[in-house]
Amino acid sequence: MPERILMGPGPSNPYPEVTAALVHPVLGHLDPAFLSILDETIERLRAVFVTANPLTMPLSGTGSAGMEAAFVNFVRPGDPVVVGVNGVFGERMCEVAERQGAAVVRVDAPWGQPLDPEAVLAAHRAPVLIAVVHAETSTGVRNDVAPIGRGKGDALLVADMVTSLGGIDVAVDDWLVDIAYSGTQKCLGVPPGLAPLTVSERARARLVERCPSWYLDLRLLSRYVESSGDGRVYHHTAPVTMIGALHAGLGALLDEGLPAAVARHAECGRLLQDGLEDLGLELFAQAGHRLPQLTTVRVPAVLPPGMDEAACRRVLLERFGIEIGGGVGPLSGKVWRIGCMGGSARVRNVIALLGALGEVLGR
Ligand code: PLP
């Protein structure tokens, strides 16, 4: 396979420690050596989510499995559920909640702008659950979660942290988030395949009696992750290699230190966004709410003769080995999405991309 600098919306390049873990000999899923890696991985997840939640685990499945678990375990048919929507992943939350039979109340904001926390809180008198995406990967916008936590009342608060975890500040307990999930392939610098998940004790007391999904049933899964030694109750064969990779990625992140990792992502994002403006390009997301790890930039009105936006991305990939992403949904063909996440968030990658993009665009 060709080597790439992965600067799309994900996956990012893994941290070197992760690549080493991926070639580690496979262990049995009940081997005590693996189980101690699993326990340590859970401990590390608590550290990066900044939570003391006992119910914290790497779910088998990608970030969407985390999203599905967040609804399928807490929503009963007819329950009012408020969802903030300003991009693809808020839309996906609505669909997942609707499939659970929730009475979904959408609170929309224009794509490229953040959600208004007051509008989210005012949308329903007594929702069972409020759900928002912290970092909208489709638009490059950061939504503020803390004000929603402060005003949530009796509702449970779900936060999608797929693109935020490990890249910008996250504070599950301080922000009063009840259910948070993430993915491995963004700022954690691990390949796709797991969904880190954490659940407050308050939410745990409200688990549905019988989760309609067997695979994502948190009552069953908790018996596996929370027991130890011979008491561990088999649920499904854990993806041992991926958990080893996540263990290594979280180790690298915590060794660097969360504040240092956040600062590295911030520096790369700033350099990239300034550099794009220096090339005469226009940033898409609202200033003040731009994610450093995922930058959206408008495709210029005038492109080199004979080239459309997809051709520009193709040249970046084929000639320079750099992947960036196109727009999705209503932004298809209108923006590029450039990631600086995990192992890809390096100044040298930003400089390489800016140089290559300048070449491609003839600027
Ligand atoms: N939520 C957000 C904010 C995402 O960016 C993504 C994926 O890009 C998902 C959820 C879904 O994650 P996955 O594609 O790993 O299932």
Image: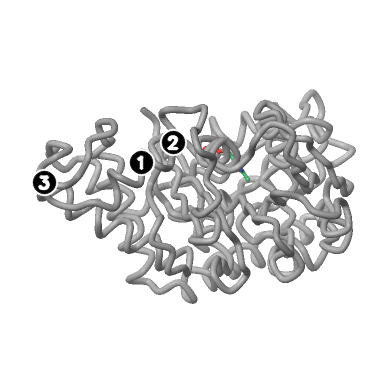
Circle 1 SS class? helix
Q: Do the residues under discs 1 and 3 have CB atoms within 8 angstroms? A: no
- Specify the amino acid type for callout 1: Leu
Residue at x 30% of width, y 63% of height: 251
Image region (quadrant) for ligand 1: top right
The residue at label 2 has a CB less than 8 Å from ligand 1: no
**Residue beneath label 3, please?**
230
Left or right of 351 on screen, residue 2 = left
Q: Is residue 253 visible?
A: yes
**Residue beneath label 1, please?**
221
Residue at x 70% of width, y 63% of height: 145
Q: Which mark is residue 217?
A: 2
Quote the CA–CA distance across marks 2 and 1.
6 Å
Where is residue 314? Give x, y as percent.
Answer: 62, 29
Q: Do the residues under discs 2 and 1 have CB atoms within 8 angstroms? A: yes
Q: Do the residues under discs 3 and 2 have CB atoms within 8 angstroms? A: no
Mark 2 closeness class: few <14, some 14–19, many ≥20 residues within 10 Å: some
Mark 3 closeness class: few <14, some 14–19, many ≥20 residues within 10 Å: few
Residue at x 23% of width, y 51% of height: 227
Q: Residue furthest front?
A: 209
- Specify the amino acid type for callout 3: Asp
Where is residue 209? Give x, y as percent.
Answer: 50, 38
